[in-house]
Image (spheres, grey):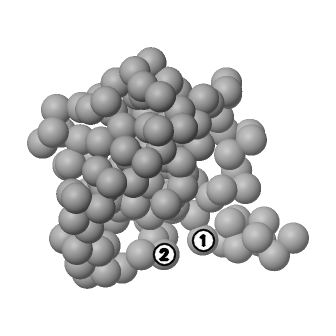
Amino acid sequence: MFNQLHRNLYRPDSGWDPIPEAYAETYNSKIEHSVVEDVIQRIEKYVGNFSGLKVLDLGGGPGHFSCELAKRGAIVLWYDVSNNYLRLAKERAELQNVNIDFEIGYIDQLPNRLSGMFDLVFNR
């Protein structure tokens, strides 16, 4: 009930953002590519090739993992509640020339907002 009330009062589609812009920028600059690569390689050992897999990057943040998954051939849906992270993730995807679908919203809205199944749900 509290989550539902909070979601109705603080809506990202109305401009509310739980992540301050300065924090988003700092976090974005601190994530190292080697860490991202290591995590993706570990997952790859279990799921095999990402090519063609439908992946939900839940809490996608600034898009580091979404982009790496897309580079490896995954069909990626980035999902987060932050407009600041959305901006950074879109910029990263454009710079890296990868296709990613973007959705913004709360986690408890997922069942009603997303259709279809995913082969992998990733949440760092």
Residue at the image position 47 percent from the left and 38 percent from the top: 45
Q: Quadrant of the N terminus?
A: bottom right
Residue at the image position 36 percent from the left and 79 percent from the top: 20
**In which quadrant of the rendered view does residue 99 lie?**
top left
Up the image or down, 74 lies above or below 14; here it is above
For label 2, the residue is 18
Tell me the crowding category of disc 1: few under 14, some 14 to 19, or many 20 or more residues within 10 angstroms, Cα based. Answer: some
Image x and y of residue 66, in percent: 37, 44
Image x and y of residue 9, in percent: 66, 72
**In which quadrant of the rendered view does residue 32 lie?**
bottom left
Q: Can residue 25 be seen from the camera position used here?
A: no
Tell me the crowding category of disc 2: few under 14, some 14 to 19, or many 20 or more residues within 10 angstroms, Cα based. Answer: few
Tell me the element at label 1: loop
For label 1, the residue is 10
Q: Earlier in the sequence, mark 2 or mark 1?
A: 1
Q: Nearer the viewer, residue 4 or 110?
A: 110
Hey, which residue is sitting farthest right in the picture? Answer: 1
Contact, mark 2 vs mark 1 (Cβ under 8 Å):
yes
Up the image or down, 20 lies above or below 34; here it is below
Image x and y of residue 7, in percent: 68, 66
Q: Can residue 41 be seen from the camera position used here?
A: yes
Label 2 or label 1, whichever lies nearer to me, is 2
Hey, which residue is sitting farthest left in the picture? Answer: 95
